[in-house]
Image (cartoon, grey):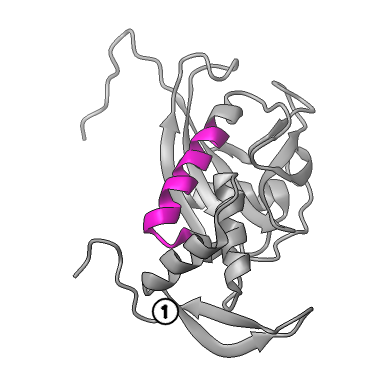
Amino acid sequence: MSTLILPPQATPAGLAVDVVAFAMHAGELQVLLVERGSLPHARTWALPGGFVHLNEELHEAALRELRVKTSVELEPRLLEQFYTFGAVQRDPRGRVVSVAHMAVLPHGTVKVSGGGTALGADWFAAHSPPPLAFDHHQILSSALERLQVRLEYALLALEFLPETFTLPELQGVYEAVLNKRLDKRNFRKRLLSQGILTTSGERRSGVGRPAQLYRKASRVRMPGSL
């Protein structure tokens, strides 16, 4: 068996994962942060993350760090890699390369608490977070950009909602992610013309006329498909 020999100038880098976990709470797009309990950046808010174990797949490391640091027990409805951050000086402890993951947690995910080395965990407005450790503000900004792009071609907004929902609730997700108001008539016309939704046959009672409930269509023709 051959042995890998590194050139003299090569220094092994640490491999880590960071998780940008989003959820909708009270009509606002929020991100899950943890309060660091150790140096560097002790008592500073950060994305949940940590070093990858030797025999661990990246997605397994991301799930482990999310569960241990925040006590989230529910499975994310989405968990995917979206970028690798490897600036030389991003971590004062040495060369650390982080594979960032974006997650969408199920509708109604609220209860979190710090675990492992985290002193605490909480939800914050994704578009106006507190000061963050390391380069986590850059990671969060990149995740928001990714989320906004995927709204248009991957039906990602539906992952933030329960199985059945109203059109105002769906529009609220778009507005929260894009961080801007949308015209109600144009939004409904565009969404309903795409064939991605179907009525559930139910209505939700409330103030005024009961609202029609929708769900994802069983067969969806994605933009550009035949």
Residue type, numbered disc 1 = Ala
- The image quarter in which residue 166 lies: bottom right
Q: Secondary structure at mark 1?
A: loop
Give the residue drawn at x 50%, y 52%. 60
Give the residue drawn at x 77%, y 46%. 122
In-image side of 159 versus 55 (left or right): right
- The image quarter in which residue 19 lies: top right
Image quadrant where one finds the N terminus: top left
Q: Nearer the viewer, residue 67 or 33?
A: 33
In-image side of 59 versus 8 (left or right): right
Q: Which residues are magenta?
A: 139-156
Does residue 155 sit above or below 100 in this rendering? below
Is 202 magenta? The answer is no
Q: Main secondary structure of the magenta part?
A: helix
Give the residue drawn at x 29%, y 71%. 221
| Residue at numbered disc 1 | 217
Q: Nearer the viewer, residue 98 or 197?
A: 197
Q: Position of residue 72 (x, y in %)?
A: 69, 57
In-image side of 76 versus 14 (left or right): right
Q: How many neighbours does mark 1 have within 10 angstroms: few (below 14), some (14-19), or many (20 or more)?
A: few
Q: Nearer the viewer, residue 98 or 6?
A: 98
Q: Position of residue 220 (x, y in %)?
A: 34, 74
Is 152 magenta? The answer is yes
Q: Position of residue 198 (x, y in %)?
A: 46, 81
Give the residue drawn at x 41%, y 21%. 12
Q: Position of residue 214 (x, y in %)?
A: 54, 79
Q: Nearer the viewer, residue 125 or 96?
A: 125
In-image side of 197 versus 125 (left or right): left
Image quadrant where one finds the C terminus: bottom left
